[in-house]
């Protein structure tokens, strides 16, 4: 078992690499934040399905992709440099065609939901 210093960056890289290899899905080590992030992407239509397999302590999260949709994933906030945004600082990604994923005190949500609720947070990544 390897130690990962940036688990969200690792998940995004696994998704990018699996799509570049034309795979139907990918697997990653499970964490609650990764699960919430992937469930948000399923809800927004960027991923097809996500589920958790295995038993503790070797749980894995499995992701399947939407056929024909290539995701452009960019990690914004990293362990070495956190990016926080207030509501007034958040701008639409690709004029509203992409999303930014934020962690807030009310959970993981998109930039549109955060602007609607008028709360800021840490910007995890952008998806277009």
Image (cartoon, rainbow, N blue to C red):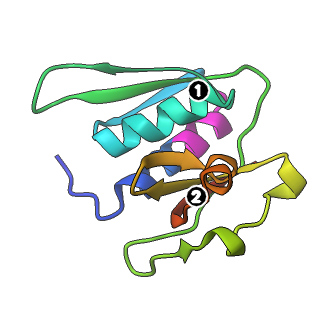
Magenta-colored span: 15-23
Mark 2 residue crowding within 10 angstroms, few (<14) / some (14–19) / many (20+) = many
Residue at 55% across / 40% down in the picture?
15
Mark 1 residue crowding within 10 angstroms, few (<14) / some (14–19) / many (20+) = some
- Eyeballing the image, is 106 above or below 58? below
Disc 1: which residue:
42
Residue at 28% across / 36% down in the picture?
30
- Eyeballing the image, is 51 above or below 56? above
x then y, percent, for residue 116: 67, 50
Mark 2 vs mark 1, CA separation in Å: 15 Å
Q: Residue furthest right?
A: 95
Q: Nearer the viewer, residue 117 or 5?
A: 117
Residue 73, visible in the rendered structure: no
- Please tell me in which quadrant of the rendered image residue 28 appears: top left
Q: Which mark is residue 110?
A: none
Residue at 59% across / 34% down in the picture?
41
Q: Is residue 48 left or right of residue 5?
A: right
- Please tell me in which quadrant of the rendered image residue 111 appears: bottom right
Q: Secondary structure at mark 2?
A: strand
Tell me if residue 20 is in the magenta stretch. Answer: yes
- Please tell me in which quadrant of the rendered image residue 64 appears: top right
Among numbered discs 2 and 1, the one appearing first in the sequence? 1
x then y, percent, for residue 80: 39, 80
x then y, percent, for residue 68: 79, 24
Residue 102, visible in the rendered structure: yes
Q: Secondary structure at mark 1?
A: helix
Q: Is residue 127 left or right of residue 120?
A: right
Tell me if residue 118 is in the magenta stretch. Answer: no
x then y, percent, for residue 17: 57, 43
Disc 2: which residue:
125
Prevalent SS, magenta region: helix
Q: Is residue 115 left or right of residue 12?
A: right
């Amino acid at each position: 078992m390897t130690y990962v210093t940036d688990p969200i960056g690792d998940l995004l890289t696994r998704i990018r690499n699996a799509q570049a290899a034309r795979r139907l899905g990918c697997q990653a080590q499970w964490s609650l934040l990764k699960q919430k992030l992937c469930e948000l992407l399923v809800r927004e239509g960027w991923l097809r399905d996500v589920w958790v397999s295995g038993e503790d302590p070797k749980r894995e999260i499995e992701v399947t992709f939407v056929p024909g949709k290539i995701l452009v994933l960019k990690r914004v906030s990293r362990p070495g440099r956190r990016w926080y945004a207030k509501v007034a600082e958040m701008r639409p990604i690709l004029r509203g065609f992409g999303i930014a994923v934020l962690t807030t005190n009310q959970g993981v949500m998109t930039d549109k939901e955060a602007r609607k609720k008028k709360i800021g947070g840490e910007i995890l990544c952008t998806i277009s």
